[in-house]
């Protein structure tokens, strides 16, 4: 369960803005990694999560947010300033028994193989039609789904929604959010060749009224349970409330939305954007495990990511594809490891969730002030690197990236100590505590 949104330049008053919360299971660590361009010999094969396919001659450099056990990515940005995020959507089609590409495989392939949003659309369509969608997307339990994609570059954006090998495409002209429900009805710009005949043959479309892709292919019960349409509408409404220009910090605030100000920890999936896992089949996969915001620019995409769970508890850190990762760390796994950013942030997150309001208050204002200062400094970089050589650009961006990382690491350690020392005045409910106790035992995570 996820939420992805885009604000075009005509609305933001500046860059194309892209943002996503990746919602997965509570202890499903994600890696944030920057991968350089790579070259492949003719005839080479690429091994995705469940399927091997021919490699391309050269790929783009990418920043990826990737569940630790998958080849593909939940979201990412490439060196050309193009971003893709995917959403689990639920069609009437049964899972394909043959190996296929997961939605996250498609995200990574699109980022590696395309220089623009329009080119990425064509890459994804060709891959879906040839290889289909398939494979278990769950971490601890089986989870099959289809995928929707929000694809953006500095000039334009598209929503691509898939059901098996069928698809519909819609150009984005205003603020747009997608979530865990099909959103393209009868106003599509392109449609797969046999989608109408396929739906009519199965009785999902009578052929007399205008063809509605979401109504024909969407599974209504799972759509209702996932609350995708409600969350997409809320994201757009929150962005629309901002007077004047929209900036990355505004999307960071949207990704932290809890609705009424408190995390939802009950059995049903919330309408809020920032999700916190609890017990039950719906809430199990409802933890925001990574968040990303990007201002897309072909010369210098500006990227901020939390590196870990729950943006309400985390700091958005800056990353630059040209500079590579600011620090070398081992890839995270299912076991708690303080050497990994995801698990360091997870220790803070779990400490705060024992009394969200009280423990967040001990460092929240400092976090907001540091984040604001980092955003202000990063925004100046476009002018600073404009006339520099490639080597000078990389050196400057690497220095800035490393300095920001060091400041963020010092802050994370300090905030974790403060949160763990703060008294618990209002603990969450019994079901929520039980769920997280089980996750901590499984990951051997240190209690806060």
Image (cartoon, grey):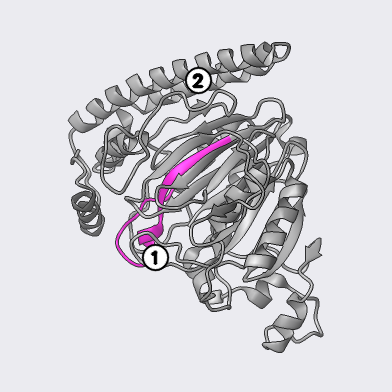
Q: Which of marks 1 and 2 is nearer the N terminus?
A: 1
Assign a secondary structure to mark 2.
helix
Q: Is residue 124 left or right of residue 337?
A: right
Q: Is residue 11 visible?
A: yes
The answer to whether residue 380 shows anywhere in this view is: no
SS label for mark 1: loop
Q: Is residue 374 above or below residue 32?
A: above
Which-is-in-front pick, marks 1 and 2? 2
Residue 31 sits in which quadrant?
A: top left
Which residue is at 71% across, 44% downward? Answer: 114
The residue closer to the viewer here, 279 or 261, is: 279
The image's mark for residue 401 is 2
Extent of the magenta region: 274-293
Q: Position of residue 145 (x, y in %)?
A: 52, 67
Residue at (46%, 18%) from the top-left corner?
402
Is 136 situated above or below 242? Answer: below
- Please identify the quarter of the rendering in which residue 394 is found: top right
Compared with residue 390, is residue 45 higher up or lower down, i.e. above or below? below
- In the image, taking residue 347 as reference, residue 171 lies left or right, namely right
Q: Residues within 10 Å of mark 2 (few under 14, many from 20)?
A: many
Please tell me whether residue 277 belongs to the stretch shown in magenta. Answer: yes
| Magenta highlight on residue 197 | no
Task: List x then y, in percent, for residue 190.
Answer: 80, 63
Tag 1 residue = 282
Horizontal and vertical percent position of residue 184: 70, 64
Give x and y (percent) for residue 176.
67, 49
**Is 121 left or right of 144, judged from the image as shown?**
right
Mark 1 vs mark 2, CA separation in Å: 38 Å
- Tell me: 220 left or right of 11: left
Q: In which quarter of the image is residue 332?
A: top left
Residue positioned most to the front: 42
């Amino acid at each position: 369960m996820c939420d992805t949104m885009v604000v075009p330049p005509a609305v933001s008053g500046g860059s194309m803005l892209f943002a996503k919360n990746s919602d997965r299971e509570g202890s499903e660590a994600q890696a944030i990694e920057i991968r350089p361009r790579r070259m492949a010999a003719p005839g080479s094969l690429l091994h995705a999560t469940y399927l091997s396919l021919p490699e391309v001659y050269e790929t783009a450099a990418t920043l990826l947010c990737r569940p630790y056990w998958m080849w593909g990515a939940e979201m990412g940005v490439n060196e050309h300033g193009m971003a893709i995020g995917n959403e689990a959507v639920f069609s009437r089609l049964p899972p394909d028994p043959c190996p296929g590409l997961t939605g996250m495989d498609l995200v990574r392939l699109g980022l590696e193989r395309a220089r623009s949003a329009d080119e990425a659309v064509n890459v994804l369509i060709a891959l879906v039609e040839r290889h289909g969608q398939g494979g278990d997307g769950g971490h601890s339990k089986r989870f099959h789904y289809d995928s929707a994609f929000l694809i953006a570059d500095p000039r334009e954006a598209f929503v691509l929604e898939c059901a098996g090998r069928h698809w519909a495409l819609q150009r984005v002209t205003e603020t747009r959010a997608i979530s865990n429900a099909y959103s393209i009805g009868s106003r599509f710009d392109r449609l797969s060749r046999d989608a109408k005949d396929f739906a009519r043959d199965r009785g999902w479309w009578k052929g007399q009224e205008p063809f509605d892709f979401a109504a024909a292919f969407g599974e209504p019960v799972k759509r209702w349970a996932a609350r995708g349409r409600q969350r997409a509408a809320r994201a757009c409404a929150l962005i629309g409330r901002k007077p004047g220009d929209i900036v990355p910090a505004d999307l960071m605030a949207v990704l932290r939305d809890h609705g009424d100000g408190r995390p939802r920890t009950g059995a049903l999936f919330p309408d809020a954007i920032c999700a916190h896992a609890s017990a039950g089949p719906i809430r199990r996969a409802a933890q925001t495990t990574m968040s990303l915001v990007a201002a897309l620019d072909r010369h210098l995409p500006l990227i901020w990511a939390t590196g870990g769970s729950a943006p309400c508890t985390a700091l958005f850190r800056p990353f630059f594809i040209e500079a590579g990762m600011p620090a070398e760390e081992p890839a995270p796994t299912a076991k708690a490891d303080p050497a990994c950013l995801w698990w360091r942030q997870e220790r803070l997150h779990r400490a705060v969730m024992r009394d969200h309001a009280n423990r967040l208050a001990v460092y929240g204002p400092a976090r907001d002030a540091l984040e604001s200062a980092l955003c202000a400094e990063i925004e100046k970089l476009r002018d600073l690197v404009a006339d520099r050589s490639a080597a000078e650009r990389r050196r400057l961006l690497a220095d800035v990236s490393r300095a920001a990382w060091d400041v963020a690491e010092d802050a994370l350690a300090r905030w974790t100590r403060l949160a763990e020392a703060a008294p618990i005045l209002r603990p969450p409910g019994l079901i929520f505590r039980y769920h997280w106790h089980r996750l901590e035992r499984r990951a051997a995570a240190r209690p806060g």
